[in-house]
Amino acid sequence: MFDGDEIILGPLPKGITRAGEGQYQRAWNVLGHTYWAKAISETSFAFETLDPPGTGVPPHVHPTQDEHIHVLDGVFTLYLDGQWEKAGPGDTVLMPKGLPHAYYNKEQGNARALFWVSPSGRLPQLFDHLHDLTDPDEVVRVSAMHDVEFLPPGTIPGAD
């Protein structure tokens, strides 16, 4: 759980995270995306995203975490293990651990989604380290230290 500037993982707390709020009043700016923490525990980490047009997360793998995306608004163009697909409002995207994936907002308007990973691993701490970084190479380097492995540019056709 969030304790000052340090995230300490423990059991999932009970309660309601109200619309427009994060469980920990914690927001991160990561290369143009805004992420709000909704739930942080040892077993799961949920966050809401605002993804402006032209933003995305290049192909990467979570070797130890399952990841899900529930699209709230807009459309995501997704790379899922060898193919490109689109997901819109109400769609849920399932990405088992080890599956190469990416997502982009290639539309004109903002996209919003609820993401969650299980177990949390070091992803909450990674977001603390990525907050306000502007150098994509540094994002890749720091991510590798937190169990998120980006694929080399050019590995996935259409991702660059």
Image (cartoon, rainbow, N blue to C red):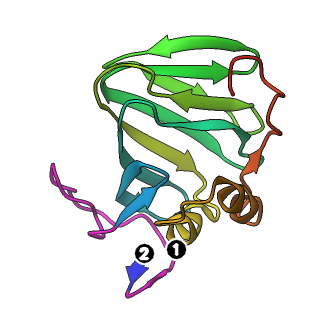
Disc 2 is placed on an element classified as: loop
Q: Residue at x 54, y 65 (%)?
A: 133
The furthest residue to the left: 19
The answer to whether 70 is drawn above or below residue 151 in the figure is above
Q: Does the residue at mark 2 contact the one at mark 1 (Cβ under 8 Å)?
A: yes
The furthest residue to the front: 135
The spot of residue 149 in percent (x, y) is 77, 49
- The quadrant where residue 113 appears: top left
Disc 1 is placed on an element classified as: loop
Q: Residue at x 50, y 79 (%)?
A: 8
Q: Amino acid at mark 1?
A: Leu
| Residue under numbered circle 2 | 1
* In front of the other: 120 or 158: 158
- The quadrant where residue 94 appears: top right
Q: Quadrant of the C terminus?
A: top right
| Magenta residue span | 4-26
Q: Residues within 10 Å of mark 2 (few under 14, many from 20)?
A: some
| Residue under numbered circle 1 | 9
Disc number for residue 60: none
Q: Is residue 16 left or right of residue 37?
A: left
Q: Is residue 150 left or right of residue 38?
A: right
The spot of residue 91 in percent (x, y) is 39, 18
Q: Main secondary structure of the magenta part?
A: loop
Q: Residues within 10 Å of mark 1 (few under 14, many from 20)?
A: many
* In front of the other: 10 or 74: 74
The furthest residue to the bottom: 4
